Amino acid sequence: MAEVDLIIAGRPYRVACRSGEEENLRAAARMVDAKSREALSGLGSLSEARQLLFAGLLLADQIIENKGGGTTLPSTPDPELAARAERLASRLESLADALENEAPKV
């Protein structure tokens, strides 16, 4: 396992990934960071969790639009896309865990 230092929405994170996937993780983090900043500029003041939520929604919307068809998704998912979605979900879970561990306890 490798660890990668990322900055998303102005906050530093250290995220684990499989060896060899570091650059893909950095690229994904840059995309999430850009969308989180887009959400913040469009919606004003947001909590960190909501900023990341909207970043994810904006990215999903972009993927749907790039596929060229509204909200109708194919009934049988592409196996490669499903595998990539699983890896992304795993990374997002790692980020969520990091957020929960870094959040100040009230």
Image: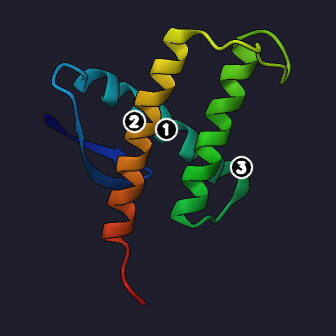
Relative placement, left or right, of 28 versus 53 is left
Residue 48 image offset from top left, x and y in percent: 51, 62
**Quarter of the image holding residue 103?**
bottom left
Amino acid of disc 1: Val
Q: Earlier in the sequence, mark 3 or mark 1?
A: 1
- Is 80 above or below relative to 85? above
Q: Nearer the viewer, residue 35 or 76?
A: 76
Q: Secondary structure at mark 2?
A: helix
Q: Residue at x 54, y 51 (%)?
A: 52
- Residue farthest front in this picture: 76
Q: Nearer the viewer, residue 106 or 46?
A: 106
Q: Secondary structure at mark 1?
A: helix
Amino acid of disc 3: Gly
Coloration mode: rainbow
Q: Earlier in the sequence, mark 3 or mark 2?
A: 2
**Quarter of the image holding residue 45?**
bottom right
Query: What separation in Å lies between label 3 and label 2 (alpha carbons)?
Result: 20 Å
Residue matched to label 1: 32
Residue 80 image offset from top left, x and y in percent: 49, 10
Label 1–label 2 contact, CB within 8 A: yes
Residue matched to label 2: 29
Label 3–label 2 contact, CB within 8 A: no
Q: Secondary structure at mark 3?
A: helix
Residue matched to label 3: 42
Relative placement, left or right, of 49 versus 68 is left
Residue 35 image offset from top left, x and y in percent: 57, 39
Disc 1 residue crowd, few under 14, some 14–19, many 20+, Cα 10 Å: many
